[in-house]
Image (spheres, grey):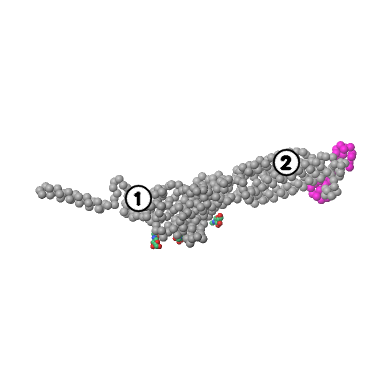
Amino acid sequence: MGKGHRLTFLLVCLVGWCYADNATSDDNKPSTSLTWIDKLKKDLFANYDRNARPTQYYNVTNLKLGITMRHVDIDEENSIFSLYGWVKMEWTDDKLKWKPEEYGQLSNFRINPDSVWKPDVVLYNNARGSDNLHYGQTNAIVYNTGKVLWVPPSDFHSFCELNLRHWPFDHQTCFLKIGSWTFDGYQLNLTNSDEPVIDIEVPNNEWSIRKVTTDRHITYYKCCTEPYIDIQYNVTLQRHSSTHKAIVVSPAFVIMLLALSVFWLPPQCGEKIVLNGIIVLIVTVFLIYFAQQLPAMSGTSPLIVTFYSTTFYLVAVSTILSVIVLRITRSRQCHSVPRLLKSQLDGCLGSVLGVSSSGNLPSEEDKEASGGDVPINTKQNDWCRLAALIDRLAFIVYLVIFVISVIYLTV
Ligand SMILES: *[C@@H]1O[C@H](CO)[C@@H](O)[C@H](O)[C@H]1NC(C)=O
Ligand SMILES: *[C@@H]1O[C@H](CO)[C@@H](O)[C@H](O)[C@H]1NC(C)=O
Ligand SMILES: *[C@@H]1O[C@H](CO)[C@@H](O)[C@H](O)[C@H]1NC(C)=O
């Protein structure tokens, strides 16, 4: 071997050794086309199965659940409560742990939730049939301790038993029951991390949240020894009904006043029937409105609807009374008022109601008109007083009924 050759060999060896030395000392550094995150993911997900719970089968995965409520609504027609919000889930994935110093001090990264294992936490009382896809596809954050934080926007629709008795001033309590579909409490330990947060972005124009309570249930089924855990949120909603107040409640008072005013028309006045007819028409329109607004309920019907339908009956009875009173006052009577009624007319009932004979003697014109035929006129006058008595009694009875129903409605 010549001298020149030996030198070249030495040089090549030296360079090769230098390269080899470089490679071992900077082993972890990703090549220029890879970032630390790329390298970390490559290492972490090399053997990752996103369908397997990321711990030994005999170890428990702790899941902390929180909820932020952003919007609520109730579909009365179908008795469905819907809640839009953010669910905060936090668990530990034993397979996603690393030392930050080995990866350029990288301590967390974001990832598509489909790439990692997720707990199968769903709404039990779901009103959307088999559709259990409550969560949006937002990124999850993975920390070097193995903690995974996922806060997807969520949409829950649950069945809710509505009680419309106090409609439109009612409040409803609906619940969301959330739990793992397949894991028992020894595999997935579900806990609520903190109190539910109410952060309404755009208020619903009808409902507001009055109260939210949280319950953690541990259920043991007959079949098995392991516990099953679920978390129940009871949400109480209050209806705000200024529109309903204007549309439904104020007219109720007007209808009441009109129905009472009928009895103040003179007994012989035929317009009573017309006024009653108008009231019946108004009430009918309202009943049709209720039939369209409210779902057909079994059990309790709203008090306000009961009020309107009762008014319907009362006005019908009032019309019949008007017919009787008209009949009494307008036709010429041959008989005098029966003695029993006459004694009432002249007695204290008559004087209390202002129809006693002293106040209602036939006037001079009446006497002249009937050619001085006083006995018939007195007879007629008695019948008129009887009609007035019926009207005033009916007025008092109706007033009492209406006052009671107003008290009942407002309490
Ligand atoms: C898993 O369970 C075993 C035995 O119960 C325990 O020694 C170990 O610390 C657990 N591992 C984790 C990560 O909790
Ligand atoms: C579940 O978590 C709660 C709170 O962190 C803890 O008190 C309880 O012991 C855990 N249950 C199981 C079975 O690990
Ligand atoms: C939630 O509502 C249910 C009935 O639906 C009731 O049994 C339970 O006690 C309520 N929980 C709370 C914390 O109020």
Indicate which disc, 1 or 2, sits on the residue closer to the N terminus. 1
Q: Is residue 134 magenta?
A: no
Residue at 66%, 40% (x, y): give it. 285
**Amino acid type, callout 2:** Asn
| Residue 123 badge | none
Q: Are marks 1 and 2 in contact (CB under 8 Å)?
A: no
**Amino acid type, callout 1:** Lys
Residue at 89%, 42% (x, y): give it. 375
Where is residue 162 drawn, in percent x and y? 58, 50
Q: Between tags 1 and 2, which lies in front?
A: 1
Q: Is residue 369 magenta?
A: yes
In the visual, does 17 lie left or right of 95?
A: left
Instruction: Measure how far apart labels 1 and 2 are at the Cα level.
Output: 81 Å
Residue at 50%, 60% (x, y): give it. 223
Tell me if the residue at label 2 has its CB under 8 Å from ligand 3: no
Q: Which residues are magenta?
A: 347-375
Where is residue 151 drawn, in percent x and y? 44, 50
Callout count? 2
Where is residue 276 drawn, in percent x and y? 72, 41
Where is residue 9 drawn, in percent x and y? 15, 49
Residue 351 showing in the rendered view: no
Residue nearest the observer in this picture, 149 or 199: 149
Label 1: state its secondary structure: helix
Tell me if the residue at label 1 has its CB under 8 Å from ligand 1: no
Q: Residues within 10 Å of mark 1 (few under 14, many from 20)?
A: some
Residue nearest the observer in this picture, 349 or 63: 63
Where does label 2 land, which residue? 276
| Residue 41 badge | 1
